[in-house]
Image (cartoon, rainbow, N blue to C red):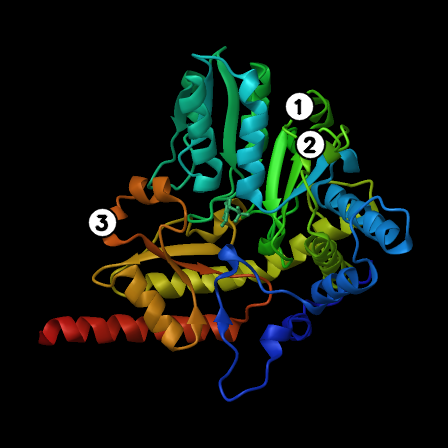
Amino acid sequence: MTQHAYDVESVRAQFPVLNQQGDTPPAVFLDGPAGTQVPQVVLDRMIEALTSSRANLHGNFSTSRRATALIEDARCAVCDLFNARSASEVVFGPNMTTLTISMTRTLAPLFHEGDEIIVTGMEHDGNASPWRMLAAERGLVVKRLDFDPLTYRLQLEELDELITDRTRLIAINYASNLLGTINDVAQICRRARAVGALTYVDAVQYAPHGPIDVQRLDCDFLVASAYKFYGPHIGVLYGRESVLSELRPHKLRIAPDVVPARFETGARSLEGIAGTLGAIEYIEAIGAAYGVADRHVSLERSRTANLHAAFAAMADYEMPLTQRLIEGLRSIDGVTVHGIVDPEDFSERVPTVSVSIDGVHPTAMAEALSDRGIFVWDGHVYAPDVIERLGLTSRGGIVRFGITHYNTAAEIETTLSAVREIVDVNSNAVMTR
Ligand SMILES: Cc1ncc(COP(=O)(O)O)c(C=O)c1O
């Protein structure tokens, strides 16, 4: 593996949106947790799919053969991204939410009245509502594994009481899209397995920042979305092969009845799946250029090793920016950061930083930042249970800053100055009212 010092300008040069020429400087994209920007290699893959492989799958002519091969190449790439045992454990779908709702439909017959499922209090609604709807339909008991609103960590000590011999499934967030906390998924999966419960891991926020190893986690399902890791709008699901092979999803009678194809209903988005392959190739190239050998594991497959090395390099770059952002925000009057703030504990967080600001509504802050060319998300960010637990529902939620490996130290300084200025303008306006 060739190693160079991480070079953010070379990285940024690969993203067309970050290099647009015009009267106004490029926006500061801190909206990564809601969707990252897309490098040229992803666009190239999508264009190639739509020009040289534009056909449905399994036809007996060249474009269709190429399309079929492309989907399988992408499946192998996701297999390596997740370190799954085989590509048959990878299912493509439109997004995480749709894949999850479909999976609840497929799993429904396995659950019986009085069975219990555990959902953490840290979930994005995509990994909460589908299970609650299933529970309402099948008469299941839903238990919540809460988080501590002071430490922003799950209260794992409560698991002993929550898990019983009726527990059938635990839904766990790998990393919170609001707090940024990375959860101890391996431990929860181990505890679930001890009572024969399934585990469903939402890795949507974790996937752009950290190495995933489903074999180490020993989870039954894990879902992610390519548009959060530099790709297009596609959802990807890992399912343990022994579990998938037992499940019977709704499907057309003429569709193949094999794993994983029987979980992919109708025509797939060829261009989306090709773009997902491009996104994984992009991350792999970061690993080849700047990779830091994974500190924790040795991996058999070289693509997986490269991907893990890329995430280590990205984290090494992203975390000092996160530290500066958190310190800067906390030095502004009235700002509270809702998440882990001690750099010693940064291995337990992704670079997603949410704040509330006394006297400034989150939407007003997001709009004022947008006027200055800085894009951030505000409100409940689809995690209403977390907002409620933090007591921020009536305050309009939070403002979320999401750092990724293409952001720069200068962008963080610009953002901090802008937040400070908006808070000052607001408090002067309040004083003169
Ligand atoms: C943690 C988390 N889970 C699930 C989702 C939903 O993903 P999708 O938009 O692919 O349905 C999101 C989207 O923001 C998310 O951040």
Rendered location of residue 318, percent (x, y) = 56, 60
Dot 3: element: helix
Tell which of 282 and 414 is nearer to you: 282
Residue 417 appears in the picture as rendered: no
Mark 1 or mark 3, which is nearer to you?
A: 1
* Residue on which disc 3 sits: 394
Which corner quadrant holds the C terminus? Answer: bottom left
Q: Amino acid at mark 2?
A: Leu
Mark 3 or mark 2, which is nearer to you?
A: 2
* Residue on which disc 2 sits: 252
Residue 401 appears in the picture as rendered: yes
* Residue on which disc 1 sits: 248
Which corner quadrant holds the N terminus? Answer: bottom right
Rendered location of residue 423, percent (x, y) = 26, 70
Q: Residues within 10 Å of mark 3 (few under 14, many from 20)?
A: few
Task: Say which label, 1 or 3, has the lower sequence index.
Answer: 1
On screen, residue 279 above or below 368? above
